[in-house]
Amino acid sequence: MAAGKGTRMRSKLPKVLQPLAGRALLGHVLDTARSLNPDRIVIVHGYGAAEVRAAFPETDLHWALQDPPQGTGHAVQMATEFLTDEGVTVVLSGDVPLIRATTISALVASCGASSLSVLSAFAADPSGLGRIVRGPGGGVERIMEEKDAKAAGRADVLALNEIYTGVLAAPSGWLKSAVKRLTNDNAQKEYYLTDVIAMARADGLALSAAQPSSELEWQGMNDKAQLAALERAHQREIANTLMVAGTTVLDPARIDVRGTLNCGTDVTIDVGCVFEGTVHLGEGVTVGAHCVLRNATIGAGTDIAPYTHIDSATCGANAKLGPYARLRPGTTLADEVHIGNFTEVKNSEIGVGSKANHLAYIGDATIGARVNVGAGTITCNYDGANKHRTVIEDDVFIGSDTQLIAPVTVRKGATIGAGTTLTKSAPEHALTLTRVKQTTIASWKRPVKQKKG
């Protein structure tokens, strides 16, 4: 179910598209659902329908429109055309993102052709949530919404702390017929899906309740503060998983994984780091404080100093990056490369042992092994309309403050003098430089600031 607006989010973005760990809330739920290999997935959508559908263009999804929304039971009514008469239907909430596949599997296992199972939990503060009402023998009898319990003066129900999480599993054929019998005779004038619990008992179905292994599995959110709290709790779980697997996370409260992070043995991650997309850190990698890595592969033994940004790039083993370095998309670094402070590399390949330690821009370049790129060097790759490539062969020394006007090639073993503007290819094993004659004007006087009258 993914039709809600999420008014209290105070956002134009539909609630199910709000991000958690770098992915839309609904995306987390769909990933979990797909892991169970269901016959079909039906998304009941409403507010921001076009935007929600555009966010999930996958062809394995079926879409049911709920407009206007009239409650959770009404949502399932909209989906019945996609349900078969056989098997089990699981109802999930698009804004409850962290439910686990193992929990859903256990719920389905307890459901059959003549039984219905709900996912319940015990909440320290059940305010606003539907309560599980059990009979004298302890079996589930019904679910009562809080507003209805208040309207009926049911203090006994309001005192209960076992709540309905919004997740249930029911025989598909029976559920299709049951939701058609729902009425909106309640405090909210909505069609409650929870009313099917009492229907199931009246129809002779067996009822059971299962519980999730973690409170995070049933937690949703209604505003940005609750979303942030869920984000931090989820990130703490990710950090714990990393640490159990052997990664050193210096402060598990200050890490953000917004995708997939794979770590080899003896990886160390300092505070404030953000990992997006798919990131692979090889054995012994050290990531300094406040680094951002997106879709990156880092070889074993590489040291990434603080405030380094790496985006869609690959780095070999035993390299040194940063601090304040930036690797942009299309960058491939070989082993033992050094990219130092305030050096930016874009769409370039840099060979084994080459170094650009200070204040350089390397764009659209192919650099060989054992090259030294001096401070202030720029590959001038853009002519205002097109990009051009710079080639620097092995064992080249580039002096400081050099501009390489692409397309240009620096041959093997060449030395480029400091301050050179290179417009033609430089021959191998020779010094190439461009200099104007140094001049001193002894009679020159520095301007003096005029006094105001």
Image (cartoon, rainbow, N blue to C red):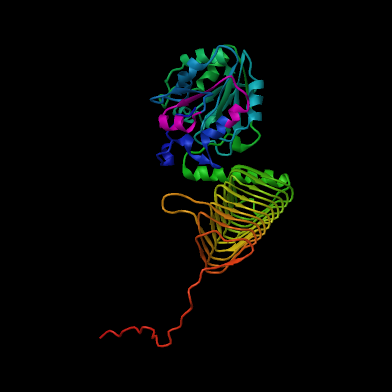
| Quarter assignment of residue 98 | top right
Q: Nearer the viewer, residue 371 or 333?
A: 371
Which residue is more in the foreground, 396 or 218? 396
Q: Residue furthest bottom?
A: 443
- Magenta segment: does it hold 162? no
**Residue 96 shows in the view:** no
| Identity of the residue drawn at 66% across and 21% down | 109
Quadrant in the rendering for residue 446: bottom left
Instruction: Report x, y in % for residue 251.
Output: 64, 54
Q: Which image quadrant: the C terminus?
A: bottom left
- What residue do we see at 38% from left, 86% from top? 445
Q: Residue at x 54, y 13 (%)?
A: 84
Residue stretch rendered in magenta on the structure: 31-57
**Does residue 53 belong to the magenta stretch?**
yes
Q: Quadrant of residue 12?
A: top left
The number of callouts visible is 0
Q: Nearer the viewer, residue 376 or 385?
A: 385
Say if residue 68 shows up in the picture: yes
Residue extending farthest to the left is 453
In this rendering, the answer to whether 57 lies above or below 368 is above
Q: Position of residue 311 (x, y in %)?
A: 56, 48
Residue 373 position within the rendered picture, expressed as x and y whole percent measured from the top left:
60, 62
In the image, residue 17 above or below residue 268 = above
| In the displayed structure image, the side of residue 236 where residue 245 appears, left or right | right
Up-down relation of residue 214 to residue 303 (above or below): above
- Give the x, y percent position of residue 104: 62, 27
